[in-house]
Image (cartoon, rainbow, N blue to C red):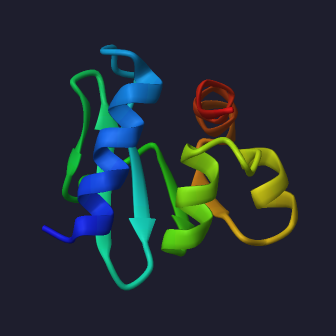
Amino acid sequence: MSEVVTQAVTAMNEKLDGSGIDGTAQFNIEGEGSMVVDSDGAREGAADADVTFNADADTYRDIFDGSLNPTSAFMSGRLTIDGDMGMAMKLAASLA
């Protein structure tokens, strides 16, 4: 597993504070791999997802450390989203 993906999984599980989400989200980290978030929390891998987020490692790092709002990342084109926008908004709120 990529160190970047490992760090993303750890950061996401901290943000979720031990709970999962209702549905499945996939985070693709350009050049590094993917992370899945569902009712069990975050883990490395890929799955059929309700919503998919795509960005580079620096963008995810900035989102997870709180220096970049996920909505701002999306509006600026640093983060792309495919799928269920309602789920994306709920998940973005928990990351902010």
Task: Determine which quarter of the picture holds residue 54.
Answer: bottom right
Percent x, y for residue 31? 37, 85
Tag count in the figure? Answer: 0
Above or below for 40 versus 59: above
Percent x, y for residue 88? 62, 39
Can you say which quadrant of the picture contains the C terminus?
Answer: top right
Left or right: residue 67 versus residue 11 is right
Look at 47% across and 27% down and name the residue there.
15
Look at 42% across and 22% down and name the residue there.
16
Percent x, y for residue 58? 57, 70
Percent x, y for residue 1? 12, 67
Q: Is residue 83 shown to the viewer in this render?
A: yes
Residue extending farthest left: 1
Q: Judge by depth and name the residue closer to the eye, 69 or 36.
A: 69
Task: Determine which quarter of the picture holds residue 37.
Answer: top left
Residue extending farthest bottom: 31
Above or below for 50 versus 61: above
Q: Is residue 48 shown to the viewer in this render?
A: no
Look at 31% across and 53% down and name the residue there.
7
Left or right: residue 81 versus residue 51 is right
Look at 30% across and 15% down and name the residue there.
18
Left or right: residue 31 versus residue 46 is right
Left or right: residue 46 versus residue 91 is left
Above or below for 88 versus 33: above
